[in-house]
Structure formats: C-alpha cells, structure tokens
Amino acid sequence: AVPPAGDRTLTAHRALMELPVAERRAVVTGDGGAERLAEAGMTWEALAGWLQGPMDAAAWEAVIPAMGTMALVRNLRNFDEAGVSDEAAARAAARISDPEAVAASRQFPFRYLAAYRHAPSLRWAHPLERALGHSLRQVPALPGRTLV
C-alpha cells in the first residue's frame, strides 16, 4: 500500500521498510539515525525485527530517545546487557525519574520496584528510587488507616 502523500510518518516508515536488510544497521547507527527512526514511528520492538539481528548498544542508543517511559523502565536490563554508553544511560535515567514523565506514564510504584530488582547495574538505582517516590502521588487516597 502506498501511504498518503501528506503522511510523513507513514512515508518515512515505508522508506525504512524498503531498505535492504544489509543496509539497515548502518542507517540506524549513522548520522541522524535516531531522528530517522523517530520520524518513522519505529518502536524498539519493531526495530528488533526490522534489523533481523541483535539489538546491540548502537541500536538501543538510536531508539532510546523515542522510547516511552514504560518501555525504558522495562528495558534497563537489556540496556546493560547490550552495553549502552553512560551518556545514553544518563539520558534514559533522567527521563525515567522526571516527575512529569512519571505522572504521564501512570505506572504504580511496584513497576519501579520490579525494575530495580531486575536491573543488573546500580546505575539505575537512584533514578528508579526517585521515580518510585514520584509515582506514590498516583496511589489513590483510601479512607481509614492504610499501610503502604
């Protein structure tokens, strides 16, 4: 199917899908790769299949800017196993612990605790603790005495 001429996202997505498999990793890791993935609406799940190869540090670093907060939290172990750079990890950590991002994600505190338990690196501990604290604001007030 041909995307409508005015739809930039579908047009960019189609252009990526038409690339030969052998050229795809170079597009992701090259200049403007992260922007190109974002313009095409490429999720990390779609990227993994599209590359038809492993999600290495370069692939993760290209897609991290377009990932939502929930996806970031769920993939901390994958980031560490792939060996993402400290700079990429710092950007992800800043987004994970941002109060507005936490509120928008609507994740409850146990999600951050689960991420902490499964992330092999302590570089995620402080951002996850901050996010957990921010997420406590989303726990509804219950009448009577409550133990959390």
Image (cartoon, rainbow, N blue to C red):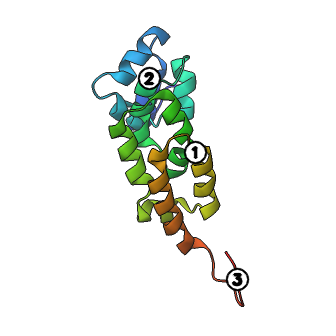
Q: In which quarter of the image is residue 141?
A: bottom right
34 and 119: which is toward the camera? 119
Q: Three-letter amino acid code at disc 1? A: Arg
Q: Name the residue under label 3.
A: 146
Q: Three-letter amino acid code at disc 3? A: Thr
Is residue 108 shown to the viewer in this render? no
Taking the view exactly as shown, the residue that stands out farthest to the bottom is: 144
Q: Three-letter amino acid code at disc 2? A: Leu
Q: Is label 2 or label 1 in front? A: 1
The image quadrant where one finds the N terminus is top right
Q: In this view, does 13 lie above or below 136?
A: above
- Residue 83: x and y, percent? 45, 29
108 and 85: which is toward the camera? 85
Q: Mark 2 points at which residue?
A: 16
Q: Is label 2 or label 3 in front? A: 3
What residue lies at 51% left-to-right and 19% top-to-bottom?
A: 51
Q: Earlier in the sequence, mark 2 or mark 1?
A: 2
Q: Name the residue under label 1.
A: 74
The answer to the question of whether label 1 and label 3 lie on touching residues, with beta carbons closer than 8 A, is no
Q: In this view, does 64 lie above or below 106?
A: above
- Residue 140: x and y, percent? 63, 78
